[in-house]
Image (cartoon, rainbow, N blue to C red):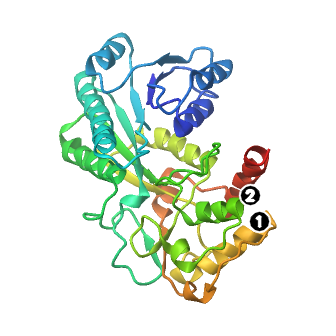
Amino acid sequence: MILIVGGLGYIGSNLVFELSKTIKDIRIIDNLSNSKMDIYHNLLKDNPNLRIDVIDATDYHKLLEIFNWNFIETIINVAHTKLNQQTSDHILNNYTNDIMIHFNLLKLCKLFNIKHYIYSSSVYIYDTHLIDKNYFIDEGHPIKITNIDPYLKIKIVSEEILKDISDHSCTKFLCLRHSEPLEFDHSLKDNYFKNTIIHKLFDSLLTNKILLPNEILSTNNDINIVINYIHIKDLIDAYILSLNYIKTMTLNIDIFNISVDNINTENISTENIYNITELIKIFNKTILEKIEIKKMEDIKKIPIICIDNTKAKNILKWKPFYTLEKIIQDYYQFYLNQILK
């Protein structure tokens, strides 16, 4: 059985939908904080065997009961608490929930000799503030140690825990570092993941706002521009291929970057990375409208940092199908269908 924690969330529900095409023995745990039961009922149409436990995974005893009654081989943890407000209570709740879920699942991995544990991490944990030229970040790049968002601190700590226990566990661990896909929801409100260049351009389109260079460059990624997007379908493919890989994995733990190809030729080199000017041109060409940005010359020479997905291509045999243009096009189509109706 595959247990998907956070299985009714955006990533989790899409993963369940795709897995159900070939695997029927799937169980979901979700507390419905970021989702609705309607999603489960829709998923049941394709997989009548799908089961759900509406519980808070911070409750170890409720989790223990589920593990006692089910033979679970693989856990996929895509659960996370959305930090909607930067208050002490919300931040503390964010830490408590996500770290406690991680701890509980790892204790159960040991108790029940769970074979595989796949953890949803983030590419934004990389330290980029000293990079002054176009650069590809691979999985060995240093991690941030200062100026870290609470959500990212959880990802960093969770990964470190996996590394620390991996040599002493019978469970194989795999971390997928990816960005949140451009989520097709009904809100374009700012939050951590909406603070990207693409979202800023959509916000400009929505509000008819003329952007300034400092608004384009103001992100949560220090002083550099990190270009990293992923289509939900490509991300789900990466999870499915990870499930295949982890079954034969010889390492105790492995880590992969999952990101769209952000180069304008087939030759991967820093000279071929899309710069900000090209990215904005792609955006304007795709949506057939023009976003007005003042003083474009001020941002033409800003170094661009890309996430290197070579390892995932070579080992997982994964390759992103959706280009940056297609990601923008799909998101814009949703924007037209939902936001403007």
Q: Which residue is mark 2?
A: 329
Q: Is residue 5 left or right of residue 293?
A: left
* Quarter holding residue 162: top left
Q: Is residue 225 visible?
A: yes
Q: Secondary structure at mark 2?
A: helix
Name above or below for residue 138 compared with residue 115. Answer: below
Identify the image quadrant of the C terminus.
top right
Q: Position of residue 80 (x, y in %)?
A: 41, 39
User: Closer to the camera, 252 or 10?
Assistant: 10
User: Closer to the camera, 308 or 202?
Assistant: 202
Q: Position of residue 163 (x, y in %)?
A: 24, 48
Q: Are marks 2 and 1 in contact (CB under 8 Å)?
A: yes
Q: Is residue 265 visible?
A: no
Q: Which residue is mark 1?
A: 286
Name above or below for residue 324 compared with residue 87. Answer: below
In this view, the residue farthest toward the top is 69
Rounded to the nearest angstrom, the CA distance separating label 2 from label 1 is 6 Å
Q: Position of residue 338 (x, y in %)?
A: 74, 44
Q: Earlier in the sequence, mark 2 or mark 1?
A: 1
Mark 2: give few (<14), some (14-19) or many (20+) Cα within 10 Å. Answer: some
